[in-house]
Amino acid sequence: MTAGWLVIAVGLVRAYLAKGSYHSLYYSIEKPLKFFQTGALLEILHCAIGIVPSSVVLTSFQVMSRVFLIWAVTHSVKEVQSEDSVLLFVIAWTITEIIRYSFYTFSLLNHLPYLIKWARYTLFIVLYPMGVSGELLTIYAALPFVRQAGLYSISLPNKYNFSFDYHAFLILIMISYIPIFPQLYFHMIHQRRKILSHTEEHKKFE
């Protein structure tokens, strides 16, 4: 997966150098982004069986929310694909995943450089809010198009006597970030203090 996200990073850089602009770079990495982010669903299984040392609940939320954003918002609402907010979360995800999967790879090899550990537990301080901002702005940009097209909505009457308003559902998704984001963010802050302080103490005794 590290190689996959490196492919996305290289694709972004090459597209930027070719175009001389950061606008609409999403189209240059759309296919690999969909492939590798959807493939991350396997990581939930990896957490469940202990291959990856992460929380199943936190990993499931992160992976499922990203897959939802990729397919149910960005893929489904073509009008938002050129929004700068899409590039914002793509860059944040790409840097985060390159660091995270490098961390897992070197940990499995029992040879984890301190720089990668430090990056894993420090750069999220900027990257996490950056990614969440991009996600929320992208969903917000999609709202008028979803309402206009009635995308994924089911209206009454119908034989199932059931209605669903996808526009309202997306608003609820945005609201859900309010209680969830701080919990995840401060969980990572706590992890950073515990792991990096432990590393510093270990260095002192060497």
Image: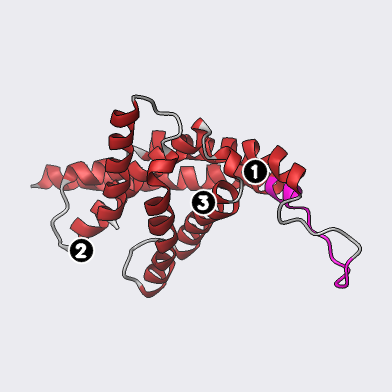
Query: Three-letter amino acid code at disc 3?
Result: Ile
Name the mark on residue 70. Answer: 3
Residue annotated with mark 1:
174
Where residue 111 sits in the image (x, y, percent)? Answer: 13, 56
Badge 2 density bin: few <14, some 14–19, many ≥20, Cα 10 Å? few
Q: Is residue 65 left or right of residue 159?
A: left
Q: Is residue 49 above or below residue 102?
A: below
User: Disc 3 or disc 2, which is closer to the eye?
Assistant: 3
Residue 174 in view: yes
Dot 2: element: helix
Q: Secondary structure at mark 1?
A: helix
> For residue 91, which quarter of the picture?
top left
Residue lying at the far left in this picture: please name it.
Answer: 206
Q: How is the image coloured?
A: secondary structure
Direction from residue 195 to residue 43 in the image, left or right: right
Q: Determine the secondary structure under disc 3.
A: helix
Q: Position of residue 196 (x, y in %)?
A: 27, 44
Q: Earlier in the sequence, mark 3 or mark 1?
A: 3
Q: Is residue 164 above or below residue 193?
A: below
The structure residue drawn at horizontal position 74% and vertical position 46%, both measured from the top left corner, is 149
Q: Nearer the viewer, residue 140 or 173?
A: 140
What's under tag 1, amino acid-wise?
Met
Per the model, the C-alpha gap separating discs 3 and 1 is 15 Å
| Quarter assignment of residue 12 | top left
Q: Which residues are magenta?
A: 158-170
Q: CA distance from mark 1 to mark 2?
A: 36 Å
| Residue appearing at x 30%, y 58% in the figure | 1
Query: Residue at label 2?
Result: 108
Residue 86 circle label: none
Q: Residue at x 11, y 46 (%)?
A: 205
* Predominant SS along the magenta part: loop
